[in-house]
Image: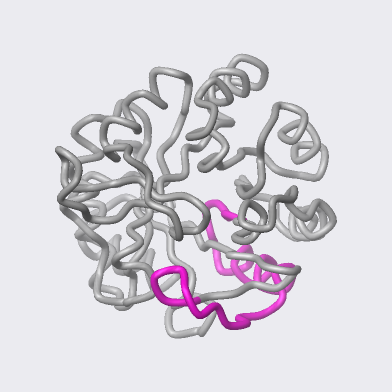
Amino acid sequence: MTLSVRVIPCLDVANGRVVKGVNFLNLRDAGDPVELARRYYEQGADELTFLDVTATVDNRNTTYDVVRATAEQVFIPLTVGGGIRSVEDVSRLQASGADKVGVNSAAIARPALIAEIADRFGAQVVVLSLDVKRSDRTESGFVVTTHGGRTETDLDALAWAQRAIELGAGELLVNSIDADGMKTGFDTELIALMRGISRVPVIASGGAGLLEHFPPAIAAGADAVLAASVFHSGELTIGDVKRELAGAGMLVR
């Protein structure tokens, strides 16, 4: 585990606006990504994740101008995901201000993409974004989904994560579709299983609703915690979460 726990707000963006739903469905407007990015940076966010949640579904690239405008507001690492299919896409995103890229559907369709990005830009740039559901069809009990959680694959989540790390993924963003937007807590079983097979940092995502939900995710093995709706709504701030983690004996920045 890394020395300091990272707290990462996530901007799920569709058509230039931040959106939020439950289990990736019924998306509703949550604000302007540039304004929210500035707010979270000022609150002390360690990193920011920007996911174009309809890019893959709409078969288009990430919205570069929105990424650029967002990057201009923050001076912390920015991860961008959605619609990334080639090293050229990564190059354009880096030129727009992205530090890291999240890959999911395109990497599943063509795993060599992970190695190509890692070889050209370094493993630290590649974040494997895992949208995971519970399933009795896989050995681990968790299956990988694509297209914003809409399509189930035949991939066992743990086996795919291991393969992606071998190919060059430098970080795992593990999002529980079952917990997404439910605000009932992170899936600590999923986090612990991912920690058990991963030699790279694990980011826990999906399910944050209360301050007390964050320390168990770190205790289960996450190096960072990611949340969206609780920050967008103002229910919690980055500072609130950091104080809660520090109170639980965890080192925060």
**Residue 64 in magenta stretch:** no
Asked whether residue 132 appears in the rendered view, the answer is yes
- The reply, left or right, for residue 143 in relation to residue 58 is left
**Residue 31 in magenta stretch:** yes
Name of the residue lying farthest toward the top: 119
- The reply, left or right, for residue 102 in relation to residue 5 is right
Q: Residue at x 35, y 45 (%)?
A: 144
Where residue 138 appears, as percent x and y from the top left, is 19, 41
- The reply, left or right, for residue 12 in relation to residue 120 is left
Relative to 86, say whether 131 is above or below: below
> Considering depth in this image, is 110 or 178 the residue closer to the camera?
110
Asked whether residue 238 appears in the rendered view, the answer is no
Q: Residue at x 36, y 23 (%)?
A: 163
* Rendered image quadrant of residue 153: top left
Q: Residue at x 54, y 20 (%)?
A: 112
**Quadrant that contains the N terminus:** top left
* Rendered image quadrant of residue 86: top right
Q: Residue at x 19, y 56 (%)?
A: 188
What colour scheme does the image use? one colour
Relative to 210, say whether 242 is above or below: above
Where residue 93 appears, as percent x and y from the top left, is 75, 41
Magenta residues (range): 21-50
Count of residue discs: 0
Where residue 168 appears, as percent x and y from the top left, is 48, 21
